[in-house]
């Protein structure tokens, strides 16, 4: 059953050096606050998993937390590359980063297999692509009923799944809506889970495309308002597009990056202090 805890305590208990950790979120509900708390607690040798790693994974990689990245696309949406990620792959700065690349469909299939307790998943994909020749976790199976040749990918079963959601009720059930990506599957596939929420409510109201995670599949619920900043939580905040644009020159220069992380992440004790440390102009218009 889910318990309510601080984000600091949840990360301290559930995320250990060497773990495989999935911080999922697609366009919105990206658990930035959790990624920065992992950095504050100096975790290392992590295998990071995510369909679309963006700025928070750039920060984790640049701060030396990651040993390996399993993903399907990486970039700073609307702004450019992830320069700390590229530096790790191309120049081993701060150290070598192993990568395992899949398609979006392949990653979703791997999460679905993990959430279903299956050893692998199948999809019509990868045929004629180079990924199948360079990624060892892509194989082929023959359908016993039709003889069709299908791609097979192993289940993803992270040690820890971390997501953001809009609400939890007082029993620890979680509700999210909007673009929900593979957040549900990431939680169900993981051995342990942490969910950051915007608000704790007495009861849920109906929402189109709403997804409810029952409290018995969640380990810790953490109340962290704006915990997805600079991404957004539908009906709670807007995307801070200026932050994404300003990250581009910061991440290009390693010394500038380290100085920024020292000032805004390592020198702050939690997400509220992180937000307070930013230029107020970056926080304008983020609330609905």
Image (cartoon, rainbow, N blue to C red):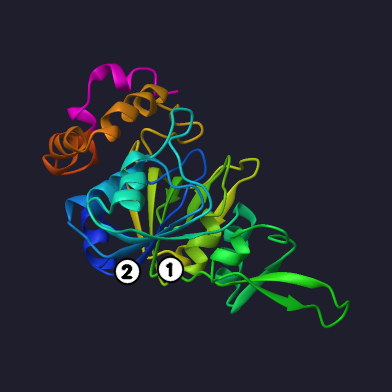
Q: Is residue 82 above or below residue 136?
A: above
Residue shown at the point (31%, 43%) measured from the top left: 84
Considering every residue shown, the one lying at the far bottom of the view is 144
The foreground one among 178 and 139 is 139
Judged left or right of residue 10, residue 238 is: right
Q: Residues within 10 Å of mark 2 (few under 14, many from 20)?
A: some
Q: Is residue 208 magenta?
A: no
Q: Residue 147: x percent and y percent?
A: 86, 78
Residue drawn 21% across and 36% down? 257
Report helix, strand or loop for mark 1. loop
- 168 relative to 80, above or below: below
Please, is residue 129 above or below residue 265 in the view?
A: below
Distance CA(mark 1)–CA(mark 2): 8 Å
Residue 49: assigned label:
none
Q: Secondary structure at mark 2?
A: loop
* Residue identifier under label 2: 19
Where residue 191 sits, quadrant-wise, is bottom left
The location of residue 89, given as percent across then percent down, is: 36, 52
Give whichever of discs 1 and 2 has the lower sequence position.
2
* Residue 108, above or below 203: below
Assign the N terminus to one quadrant of the image: bottom left
> Which residue, given by chain and number where applicable, does mark 1 sit on?
158
Q: Residue at x 28, y 70 (%)?
A: 18
Q: Is disc 1 in contact with disc 2, using a CB cutoff of under 8 Å?
A: yes
């Amino acid at each position: 059953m889910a318990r309510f805890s601080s984000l600091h305590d949840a990360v301290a208990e559930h995320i250990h050096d060497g773990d495989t950790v999935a911080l999922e979120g697609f366009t919105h509900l990206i658990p930035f606050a959790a990624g920065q708390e992992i950095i504050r607690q100096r975790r290392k040798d992590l295998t990071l998993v995510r369909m679309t790693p963006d700025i928070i994974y750039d920060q984790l990689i640049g701060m030396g937390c990651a040993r390996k990245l399993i993903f399907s696309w990486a970039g700073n949406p609307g702004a450019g590359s992830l320069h700390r990620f590229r530096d790790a792959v191309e120049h081993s700065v701060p150290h070598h980063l192993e990568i395992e690349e899949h398609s979006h469909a392949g990653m979703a299939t791997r999460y679905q297999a993990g959430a279903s307790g299956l050893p692998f998943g199948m999809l019509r994909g990868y045929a004629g692509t180079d990924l199948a020749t360079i990624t060892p976790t892509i194989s082929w199976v023959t359908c016993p009923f039709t003889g069709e040749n299908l791609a097979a990918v192993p289940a993803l079963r992270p040690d820890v799944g971390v997501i953001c959601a809009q609400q939890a009720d007082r029993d620890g059930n979680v509700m999210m809506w909007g673009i929900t990506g593979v957040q549900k599957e990431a939680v169900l596939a993981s051995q342990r889970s942490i969910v950051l929420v915007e608000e704790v409510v007495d009861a849920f109201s109906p929402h189109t495309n709403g997804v409810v995670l029952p409290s018995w599949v969640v380990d810790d619920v953490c109340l962290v308002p704006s915990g997805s900043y600079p991404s957004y939580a539908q009906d709670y905040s807007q995307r801070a597009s200026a932050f994404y644009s300003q990250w581009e020159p910061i991440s290009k220069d390693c010394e500038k990056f380290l100085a920024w992380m020292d000032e805004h992440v390592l020198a702050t004790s939690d997400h509220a202090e992180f937000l307070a440390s930013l230029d107020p102009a970056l926080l304008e218009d983020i609330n609905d």
